[in-house]
């Protein structure tokens, strides 16, 4: 069963995601990031070219011909056919393909609408019997 970890009240979800991607890649994991839209995909893509400053995080979009060979896939398309073991969700809804992954990280920003969508996702997974952990990243 997929291990689900929620991180809430995240001040900068894109930056937090980039840090998680770097950590998972350093552990030899294949990572799929589901972003909410094309703009977030573009922002994360740019950030992964900068992080880490002395390294490289090989990543492509889901539609890339190199997707099956690349350890990090970032995209806002709500599908996933390739191999990966870590899913990072930035979208407002549960990904239909999440159960294929060993681990999933839900990154929830501090905006109230985003937080409400995060609470709905928590209820969705809980109703299906998934055990989850929760970490508050910043306190108000």
Image: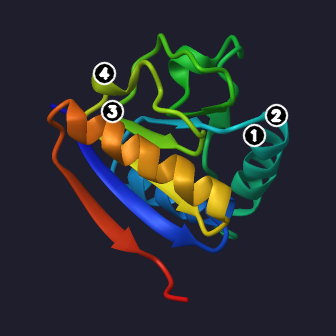
Q: Residue, x 66% and y 55% (percent of image)?
A: 113
Q: Are marks 3 and 2 in contact (CB under 8 Å)?
A: no
Determine if residue 7 is in view: yes
Q: Are marks 4 and 2 in contact (CB under 8 Å)?
A: no
For the N terminus, give its image quadrant.
Answer: top left
| Residue underneath mark 3 | 85
Q: From the viewer's perspective, tell me whether residue 76 is left or right of residue 128.
A: right
Query: Mark 1 to mark 3: distance in Å?
Result: 20 Å
* Residue 136, image x, y percentages: 41, 75
Q: Is residue 28 above or below residue 6?
A: above
What coloring was used for the rendering?
rainbow
* Residue 65, image x, y percentages: 69, 11
| Disc number placed over residue 41 in the picture, else none | 1
Viewer-side label of 4, 3: 4
Viewer-side label of 3, 2: 2
Q: Is residue 140 above or below residue 70?
A: below
Q: Are marks 4 and 3 in contact (CB under 8 Å)?
A: no
| Residue underneath mark 4 | 100
Q: Residue, x 82% and y 34% (percent of image)?
A: 38
Among the two numbered marks 1 and 3 on one chain, the one whose residue lies closer to the N terminus = 1
| Residue underneath mark 2 | 38
Quadrant in the rendering for residue 99:
top left
For the C terminus, give its image quadrant.
Answer: bottom right
Quadrant in the rendering for residue 116:
bottom right
Among the two numbered marks 4 and 2 on one chain, the one whose residue lies closer to the N terminus = 2
């Amino acid at each position: 069963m997929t291990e689900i970890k929620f991180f809430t009240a995240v001040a900068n979800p894109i930056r937090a995601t980039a840090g998680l991607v770097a950590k998972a890649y350093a552990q030899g994991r294949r990572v799929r990031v589901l972003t909410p839209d094309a703009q977030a995909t573009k922002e994360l893509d740019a950030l992964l070219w900068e992080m880490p400053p002395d390294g490289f995080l090989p990543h492509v979009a889901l539609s890339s011909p190199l997707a099956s060979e690349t350890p990090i896939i970032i995209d806002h398309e709500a599908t996933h056919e390739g191999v990966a073991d870590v899913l990072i969700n930035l979208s407002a809804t549960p990904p239909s393909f999440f159960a294929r992954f060993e681990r999933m990280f839900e990154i929830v920003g501090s905006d109230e609408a985003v937080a409400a969508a995060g609470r709905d996702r928590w209820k969705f997974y809980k109703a299906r019997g998934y055990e989850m952990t929760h970490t508050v990243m910043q306190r108000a």
